[in-house]
Image: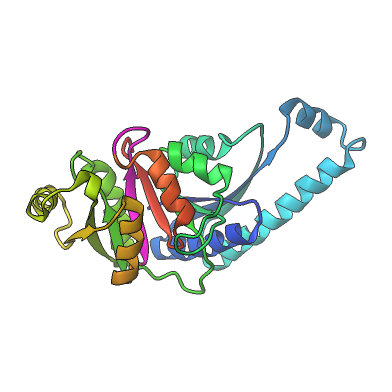
Amino acid sequence: MKKILVPTDFSDCADNAAVVALQIAQKASAQIDFFHSLVTPIDWVKLAIQKEKRYPETKKKISRAKSALRNWVNDAQQLGLKSELILTFSQGTESIELQAQSHQYDLIVMGSHGASGLKEALIGSHTQKLVRESSTPVLIIKAGVEEFKVEKIAFVSTFEEDVHHSFNHIIAFANLMEAHIKLLYVNVPRHFEESRKSEAKMRDFLEKCPRGTCSINVYNDTSPEAGFFHFSEDRNIDLIAIVTHGKKGLFRSSLTERLVNHSALPILSVNILV
């Protein structure tokens, strides 16, 4: 991991993500860049920049954003890390993904509003869109922590499709954090499967996996989401990892979004096309 991108809107949850991202960057000795996009009609922005005296509020917004970004950059540099601030103007939510793609970031770390457990909460539109479409792995952080420790990762999958290439990103993250990976298949009534068949699929998966220390787990529950959460509670999981499949398959983007929306745990989402 060489480059980490931290989008921020300067909210508390974004600050939580930035603190975690700094710790990850320090472990990896990675460059960490802090990104903010002022979402405004682009024609208005161009006019405002050209005539700042007539649009003092725009100048204030730019100044405040640069100052806040610079504080995070200073924190990173004090840790001996390379860091830059990035301030752009955008008409929508595409700017984060464009920034990540064009500058070849290895990980996006982003905060999200939400509640603990299964309590309903609204995920931010930027985070929701990013989880659905990003070609860069995305780590979603909910709660603030003084020390970001990940000892147990639950990797949830049907283990029916070849996701090994995407899974390599999860392995790399687990190796960095010195974490154990628990392969998790959630068996639900609607798609019931004998445990021996599920376990056989996971053993086949491990045969192609460059990390042989993963454990196999079959968990019975009423729904995939309930299984994720209950297994995580029972086994003291620190992070849930998932490979998203766009709009197809059990782990299509909508299910991943609900998981991110409802879980208090950090979520590492990797697109199957990565």
Image coords of residue 73 (percent x, y): 61, 58
Q: Give the range drawn in magenta.
A: 238-249
Measured along the vertical axis of the image, is residue 208 above or below residue 174? Answer: above
In the image, 195 versus 94, the foreground residue is: 195
Position of 263 relative to 99 (above/below): below
Q: Residue at x 23, y 56 (%)?
A: 184
Residue 228, quarter of picture: bottom left
Q: Residue at x 44, y 58 (%)?
A: 263
Residue 90 as seen in the image, left or right of residue 204: right
- What residue appears at the point 35 percent right and 57 percent down from the top-left corner? 226
Residue 189 in percent (x, y) is at 23, 49
Return the residue found at the far right. Answer: 54
**Image coords of residue 157 (percent x, y):** 25, 48
Give the residue drawn at x 33%, y 49%.
Answer: 242
- Residue extending farthest to the top is 43
- Give left or right: position of 86 versus 237: right
How many numbered marks does the figure carry? Answer: 0
* Residue lying furthest bottom: 146
**Is 56 left or right of 257, judged from the image as shown?**
right
Picture colour scheme: rainbow
User: Does residue 198 appear left or right of residue 125 in this picture?
Assistant: left
| Quarter of the figure with the C terminus | top left
Q: Verify whether residue 239 appears in magenta.
A: yes
Residue 136 appears in the figure = no
Q: Is residue 150 visible?
A: yes
Residue 87 drawn above or below residue 181: above
Q: Which of 219 and 135 is in front in this view?
A: 219
Judging depth in this view, the residue of 227 and 245 nearest the camera is 227
Whether residue 7 is in magenta: the answer is no
The image quarter in which residue 213 lies: bottom left
